[in-house]
Amino acid sequence: MSPRPQPRIETSMGTLTVDTITVRGRNLVDDLMGNIDAASLFFLEVTGRLPEEAENKLLNAMIVAIAEHGMMPSVIAARLTIFGAPESFQGAVASGLLGAGDVFVGPTSNVARILQVEAAEFEGSPAEKAEKIVDKYQQQGRRIPGLGHPHHPVDPRSEKLLAMQRELGAPRAHTDLMLAIHKAACDRRGKHLTFNAVAAVGAIASDIGIDWRAVRGIGLVARTIGLIGHVFEELNRPSAQAIWNLVEENSDYSDPQGA
Amino acid sequence: MSPRPQPRIETSMGTLTVDTITVRGRNLVDDLMGNIDAASLFFLEVTGRLPEEAENKLLNAMIVAIAEHGMMPSVIAARLTIFGAPESFQGAVASGLLGAGDVFVGPTSNVARILQVEAAEFEGSPAEKAEKIVDKYQQQGRRIPGLGHPHHPVDPRSEKLLAMQRELGAPRAHTDLMLAIHKAACDRRGKHLTFNAVAAVGAIASDIGIDWRAVRGIGLVARTIGLIGHVFEELNRPSAQAIWNLVEENSDYSDPQGA
Amino acid sequence: MSPRPQPRIETSMGTLTVDTITVRGRNLVDDLMGNIDAASLFFLEVTGRLPEEAENKLLNAMIVAIAEHGMMPSVIAARLTIFGAPESFQGAVASGLLGAGDVFVGPTSNVARILQVEAAEFEGSPAEKAEKIVDKYQQQGRRIPGLGHPHHPVDPRSEKLLAMQRELGAPRAHTDLMLAIHKAACDRRGKHLTFNAVAAVGAIASDIGIDWRAVRGIGLVARTIGLIGHVFEELNRPSAQAIWNLVEENSDYSDPQGA
Amino acid sequence: MSPRPQPRIETSMGTLTVDTITVRGRNLVDDLMGNIDAASLFFLEVTGRLPEEAENKLLNAMIVAIAEHGMMPSVIAARLTIFGAPESFQGAVASGLLGAGDVFVGPTSNVARILQVEAAEFEGSPAEKAEKIVDKYQQQGRRIPGLGHPHHPVDPRSEKLLAMQRELGAPRAHTDLMLAIHKAACDRRGKHLTFNAVAAVGAIASDIGIDWRAVRGIGLVARTIGLIGHVFEELNRPSAQAIWNLVEENSDYSDPQGA
């Protein structure tokens, strides 16, 4: 085969030379280590700039809000995985992370998509845009993500995030639109819907400049932290055998139909 | 089957009630959100307490140090995964995380294990313990993790972390032991070995009270952040097709022997 | 908390008693081991019945058709993963499997969905239904999965599968519909489109009675087999370092815009 | 950077040209499709040759033996994963596969390693080698994999596999050695130990020529098949919410010590 031109790969994430590690245009050792926290690094990774103080505080609060809620499905999966594969801590974390999909974590990106992308289809004030978005979802028979909760009229995590945003004087155009959507949806449904943490994270993440597709990254960082905690606890105080027994004892087998 | 007592599952990670989310003994909304950063939450998850300021700074610096180094193997894997499965951001991150195993991230836990567990087998001063540990590894024909680098006599990330530790006046018993091990290993080998970032992270994480098995969690948080950045860049500026072409064009197929 | 009734879990997959392992209504040891092959077990798992001989032959041919194609993206990902985590063979296979998503493997389920679900929206002969399906996709601006190929007018794997189906005298209503869709799409586009392996697998799997959502399972079994082969070769003849070097040498870093 | 010679990647797995797909030295369409089953393809992938009939029968029986046992930990993990990420069938399968590690699937490779590698350290008849291997494990305080079962003196899957091997007149040097190891271990312990399916698979896989490191691939293929069945059932008859409820209701939270 005669030599063909090799395709080139373009990246702005980072690079190494003999002397220097560069991360997103910064010198890793001189500019970043000791000067920024983990959340700021996440912010730098997905926006290309460092967060201002209010952005950093809000981002950290969002990560903290959604990292740990006890024995959730992804945590149970990770505990069962380390039980079968104790040699692979990362495998257990990964198995839990794989459940951070369209049901629990993805909706934060869907909220952000409405605010960053779909809202641009419409004109008018936030209240007018909100009406049109609620119309559109109603016509398509789709639920607006971030609204509603099985048990709670108020999600205290949302209240806290919204209060922080106000106190910090942070930009809030996307949040105002999401609140207007919330109001329009409650009016339309004729009942109160919870403005839940998914709505707050999707909106505030949009206001601090995170692209809608990267918003679910907030949940992935948060879940990784929570999963590491649970996998480590599982190593010290195993529960997987008890979980397995519970499931077996509460399972009823029947032959497949027509078998 | 007559009802058997259900096995109970014990956890100290977190729990939900109708009104409250508890994370590691704290009220999530009142005590944690707005008060702690993501790294502190990681620390709380794996130690059960909140970090002091110096501990927090060192932990953040360690996460920042090992999160992003450009086109590394796990990053390439994640980019190839999102190429085939664009519907699953978390799947791409998980595929990259699966490579954070015994070669790159695991050794930080191995360093911490030497300092937290293996060192207790021996008595004496740090220098004496270090000699005995180096003896043991030499007799077993094993390399001590964290020492050596293909190109660099000095790892600037280690230098920075050690300097921060000194300036912050943080506890450093484990770090001193690791430095003594480093000295003993260099003397024994008759040549300079780099005290690399694996050694610094394993030692400093031990000094801030992170159990050796959880030390690799620092790398998992860091890699998750870096992987999210790369997967997001891949969505905006795809490289996977170019990577695939490169590998195909530089691959030579031969029939299996005896086929 | 007063005892609440435990939720029950219903399954027809399998169960263990002190004496017997039951798989889908069969005794594992007496009925299945020695009597059925791996593909028949897959068929039993997803349909609840054992395949007839023609169904078995077609299923095996489909698995063989899509398991191994050399240095594909998912294979490269798996090789890079075992490089970083040699302790976890299953982690490397899983990392490759994570790329078996909507781009390469999922489309077989999408073809089957058209044939099993979407076609029921329309009435008439296969040719008439085909016209209406092509209309619908055209109006929605969507490509019909399984049609087209960057290089080949004919996909020899499809030809082989279709020939086997004819020779075996197997049911072919779904395949006939897919061929009619192919004809209608070619006519509409005014050019020949390849009837590729995705189309053949989606159609023939439908004809042997596999639910459209389980059709992608054929690709997952196939890929698992191929991935195991590559991960094992990687252990014997490592390529990951060369892949990494290739990618690094062909990558161009630039600072992020506005950084 | 002046152009450097690109590293080359060597493979014997497969390759594509404009006209032909080659898999392990065979023409995929002409030689393999329609002629071999999925298990034979697995065999070809990891050995480079096609299995003889007895080898094929034994391999299929081993896959069938270990694929499906109802509500096992990896299956529960996969069900919880599809609950959170219904968009990713492959992610759920991968999350279950990640638990196929050192506890359940890996031991088949460990048995094979004893027979293929460790046994070569010793000389003498099978009975003599067996004694020395049992000595070695006893001195190292290690359990020999494949021996023992919590409830059953006899594993009917092992009995079936051994009977098939005899009836097929297949080679059995490794199996004879494993049976001798079993006898020696029972004598040494003064009690009967079950010769379980792990022992049978590790030994018979060795006798049909599968390298010990690839033996765990048999379990990975088997588990993939079983996991696909369970994930598909979960889509039709969801159990994840019930599993989650069960675990939550049977969990007791306590604050971390010293928190």
Image (tube, coloured by chain):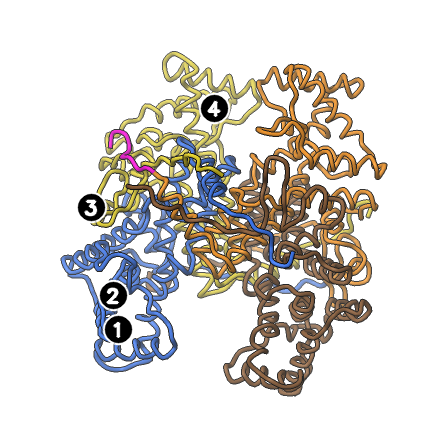
Chain colours: A yellow, B blue, C orange, D brown
- Chain that bears disc 3: A
Disc 2 target residue = B193
| Residue C76 rendering spot, x and y as whole percentages | 49, 46
The reply to the same-chain question for discs 4 and 3 is: yes
Q: Element at badge 2?
A: loop
C-alpha span from label 4 to label 3: 44 Å
Select label 3 or label 1 by which is in front: 1
The reply to the same-chain question for discs 4 and 1 is: no
Select label 4 or label 1 by which is in front: 1
Q: From the image, give the main secondary structure of the stretch colored magenta.
A: loop
Quadrant of the frame with the C terminus of chain C? top left
C-alpha span from label 3 to label 1: 36 Å
From this viewpoint, is residue C89 visible?
yes
| Residue C251 rendering spot, x and y as whole percentages | 35, 39
Q: How many labels does the image show?
A: 4
Residue in front for this viewpoint, A108 or A88: A88
Residue in front for this viewpoint, B173 or D208: D208
Select label 4 or label 2 by which is in front: 2
Residue at left offset 51%, top offset 53%? C92
Residue at left offset 50%, top offset 40%? A101
| Residue D115 rendering spot, x and y as whole percentages | 61, 74
The reply to the same-chain question for discs 3 and 1 is: no
- Amino acid at pointer 1: Arg
Residue D171's place in the image compared with B214, above or below, is: below
Q: What residue span does the magenta drawing correspond to?
A: C252-259
Q: Residue B189 carries which label?
A: 1
Specify the farthest residue to the top. A124
Answer few, some or many: residues within 10 Å of disc 2's Cα (few below 14, many 20 plus, some between 14 and 19). many
Disc 3 target residue = A35
Q: Which mark is residue A186?
A: 4
Q: Element at badge 1?
A: helix
